[in-house]
Image (cartoon, grey):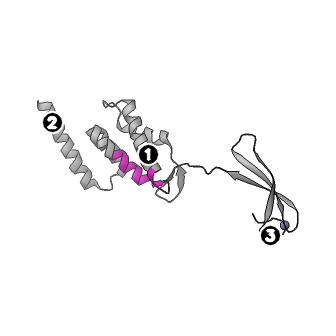
Amino acid sequence: MKCPHCGYKEDKVVDSRATQEESAIRRRRECLKCGKRFTTYEYVEEVSLMVVKKDGRREPFDRKKVLSGILRACEKRPIGMEKMEEIVTYVERAIQKKSDREVSAAKIGELVMERLKTLDDVAYVRFASVYRQFKDVGQFMVELKDILSKEKRKGAR
Ligand SMILES: [Zn+2]
């Protein structure tokens, strides 16, 4: 560790102890050149997952935020809370698997849609419409028509 007093790169550790909350190790070091003492702290690296937003800003991954989007899409649909939580967990695991532990907001949307599609068509379309912000209206209409015709067929039975 470079000495803050003289810049020399060798030192000896004279004392080493955990901080009170044991979240860090505090070491007292003595410079081998100038003999002055200084302190270093060793922390565990935080393993939070980060979301990269459209404008490039990053924010910590928030389960609640993802869940609230799913809740909105699933309103009055026959999907239990447990299923919705499962989707969030699925998304969370997918980010954890990435080496940089970072994911774009767009990717989160895709992962949620992927799961909703297998669960409930209406919830899926709702989520997709909010999420995609009608950027691809054509695709949206195709999916909507498909779902509406399915619903009609169900009703005719
Ligand atoms: Zn020094």
Q: Quadrant of the C terminus?
A: top left
The 10 Å Cα crowd at callout 1, few under 14, some 14 to 19, many 20 or more, is few
Does residue 111 show up? Answer: yes
Name the side, left or right, on which 76 lies relative to 23: left
Element type at marker 1? helix
Q: Earlier in the sequence, mark 3 or mark 2?
A: 3
Q: Amino acid at mark 2?
A: Lys
> Secondary structure under badge 2?
helix
Q: Please state the quadrant of the image where ligand 1 appears.
A: bottom right
Look at mark 3 in the image and give the residue it sits on. 8
Residue drawn 54% across the image and 51% down it: 59
* Front disc: 1 or 3: 3
Q: Is mark 3 within 8 Å of ligand 1?
A: yes
The amino acid type, in three-letter code, at marker 1 is Arg
Mark seen at residue 152: 2
Q: Position of residue 130 (x, y in %)?
A: 36, 46
Q: Residue 142 bears which disc, if any?
A: none
Residue at image x 44%, y 42%? Answer: 66
The tag earlier along the polypeptide, 1 or 3, is: 3
Residue 70 in the image: state x and y as whole percent: 39, 39
Residue positioned most to the right? 35
**Is residue 71 visible in this depiction of the protein?**
no
Residue at the disc numbered 1: 93
In front of the other: 150 or 112: 112
Give the crowd class for mark 2: few <14, some 14-19, many >=20 residues within 10 Å: few
Q: Which residues are magenta?
A: 97-113
Up/down of 119 relative to 34, above or below: above
In the image, 77 versus 9, the foreground residue is: 9
What type is the residue that disc 3 sits on? Tyr
Give the CA separation, mark 3 to mark 2: 78 Å
